[in-house]
């Protein structure tokens, strides 16, 4: 148990120190983002500093005719066999317009890896105060968020990891059902 606490302490220190810049740009959606590869690259200095290493693995399962990828991000202690692992579950949308099956799986895989790492490292992907500051410009209407939307699962994970419903409300126009479910988490 003592060794597990040592790894938990190392992870906690890394969570506090780690910064992952949003260095990539989506020209279609006009937003910056970070990828799993960006996160992994940013973690490399912590490997020797804390004598740990990180891994990502995936499992595939078919659930109710929907392929699902379970991405697992883990931190391993070099000095022991201790591991802390978290998961992210992502459905594969085989009907995504303009994507072949391998692209749909690749997209879901990338998304799952990124969110598994985000869950492990407590990376908050919600907009910060500066990002929501309009600097006097007209504000676009908020995107509607319903329980059937893919982003709803992300919102649930955010709440389960300590985020607030108010933060989600700043970004989305929640349906009554979505707000009720998120408030109860």
Image (tube, helix red, strand yellow):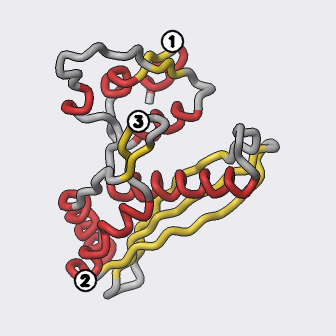
Q: Mark number for residue 94? A: none
Q: In the image, is 79 to the left or to the right of 72?
A: left
Measured as percent of width and height from the top left, residue 115 is found at: 46, 51
Q: Earlier along the polypeptide chain: callout 2 or callout 1?
A: 2
Q: In the image, is 5 to the left or to the right of 81?
A: left
The residue pinned by badge 2 equals 48
Please tell me whether residue 172 is drawn above or below residue 156 in the rendered image. Answer: above
Q: Judge the density around disc 3: few (<14), some (14-19), many (≥20) Cα neighbours within 10 Å.
A: few
| Residue at 29% over, 78% down | 47
Please tell me whether residue 89 is drawn above or below residue 49 in the rendered image. Answer: above
Quadrant of image for the C terminus: top left
The residue pinned by badge 1 equals 176
Measured as percent of width and height from the top left, residue 139 is found at: 31, 15
Q: Look at the image and tell me whether residue 180 can be seen.
A: no
User: From mark 3 to mark 1, how far is it between C-alphas?
Assistant: 29 Å
Q: Nearer the viewer, residue 99 or 36?
A: 99
Label 1 secondary element? helix
| Residue at 26% over, 27% down | 132
């Amino acid at each position: 148990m003592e060794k597990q606490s040592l790894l938990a302490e190392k992870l906690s220190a890394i969570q506090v120190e780690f910064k992952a810049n949003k260095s990539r740009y989506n020209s279609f959606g006009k937003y910056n983002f970070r990828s799993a590869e960006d996160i992994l690259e940013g973690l490399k200095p912590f490997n020797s500093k804390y004598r740990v290493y990180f891994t990502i693995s995936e499992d595939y399962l078919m659930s109710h005719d929907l392929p699902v990828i379970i991405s697992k991000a883990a931190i391993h202690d070099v000095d022991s066999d201790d591991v802390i692992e978290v998961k992210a579950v992502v459905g594969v949308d085989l009907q995504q317009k303009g994507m072949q099956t391998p692209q749909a799986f690749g997209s879901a895989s990338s998304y799952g890896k990124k969110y598994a790492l985000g869950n492990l490292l407590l990376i908050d992907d919600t907009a910060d105060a500066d990002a929501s500051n309009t600097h006097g410009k007209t504000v676009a209407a908020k995107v509607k968020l319903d329980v059937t939307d893919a982003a709803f699962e992300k919102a649930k994970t955010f709440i389960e990891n300590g985020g607030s419903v108010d933060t989600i409300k700043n970004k989305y126009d929640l349906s009554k059902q979505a707000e009720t479910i998120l408030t109860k988490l």
